Image (spheres, rainbow, N blue to C red):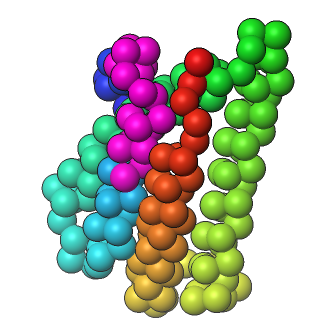
């Protein structure tokens, strides 16, 4: 993400940032669906490749999405738009943590994660990635439905 974000930010100045952000979200969604198939024998190379896919997807999403949002408001509303963007990002992060913890609680319960319950842990991780993949997939269509930035 750190490598590609500056390039995608510049690209979003030239092309429709909403479409670039949607493409990034599609990559993230694909990565989530793929990583939902991890297991105890999943290679570190496979996980690393998916993390690279996530990084590219986040780079394609983050800067262009911010550009699209900030470009859709008048200059006098930049502070409100920026504050709203930060709030929505934090709400998304907290909601994701809540969903993940709920899934862990359902499958693992109120016990310490240790080798005796690693099967339940892997199951809960796979379900969480699947749920987040579905949510991200739905988000692609919301991202595509946004209006043109100014």
Residue 114 position within the rendered picture, expressed as x and y whole percent measured from the top left: 50, 80
Left or right: 6 in relation to 88 = left
The quadrant the N terminus occupies is: top left
- Look at the image and say whether residue 66 sits in the magenta stretch: no
The quadrant the C terminus occupies is: top right
Residue 2 position within the rendered picture, expressed as x and y whole percent measured from the top left: 38, 25
Asked whether residue 25 is in view, the answer is: yes
Q: Is residue 26 placed above or below 61 in the rendered structure?
A: below
Asked whether residue 136 is in view, the answer is: no
Residue 10 position within the rendered picture, expressed as x and y whole percent measured from the top left: 38, 14
- Look at the image and say whether residue 13 sits in the magenta stretch: yes
Splitting the image into 4 quarters, where does residue 88 fall? top right
118 or 49: nearer the viewer: 49
Which residue is most to the top?
A: 75
Q: Is residue 70 placed above or below 92 in the rendered structure?
A: above
Residue at 48% of width from left, 70% of height from top? 134
Residue 148 position within the rendered picture, expressed as x and y whole percent measured from the top left: 54, 30
Q: Is residue 115 placed above or below 147 in the rendered structure?
A: below
Left or right: 18 in relation to 11 = right
Splitting the image into 4 quarters, where does residue 46 fall? bottom left
Q: How many marks?
A: 0
Residue at 57% of width from left, 25% of height from top? 149
Residues rendered magenta in the picture = 9-26
Q: Main secondary structure of the magenta part?
A: helix
């Amino acid at each position: 993400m750190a490598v590609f974000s500056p390039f995608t930010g510049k690209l979003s100045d030239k092309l429709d940032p909403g479409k670039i952000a949607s493409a990034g979200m599609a990559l993230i969604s694909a990565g989530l669906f793929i990583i939902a198939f991890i297991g105890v024998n999943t290679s570190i190379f496979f996980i690393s490749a998916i993390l690279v896919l996530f990084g590219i997807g986040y780079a394609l999403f983050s800067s262009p999405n911010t550009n699209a949002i900030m470009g859709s408001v008048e200059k006098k509303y930049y502070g409100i738009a920026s504050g709203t963007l930060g709030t929505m990002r934090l709400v998304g992060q907290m909601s994701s943590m809540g969903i993940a913890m709920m899934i862990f609680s359902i499958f693992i319960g109120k016990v310490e994660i240790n080798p005796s319950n690693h099967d339940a842990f892997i199951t809960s991780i796979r379900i969480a990635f699947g749920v987040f993949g579905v949510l991200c997939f739905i988000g692609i269509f919301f991202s595509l439905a946004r209006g043109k930035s100014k």
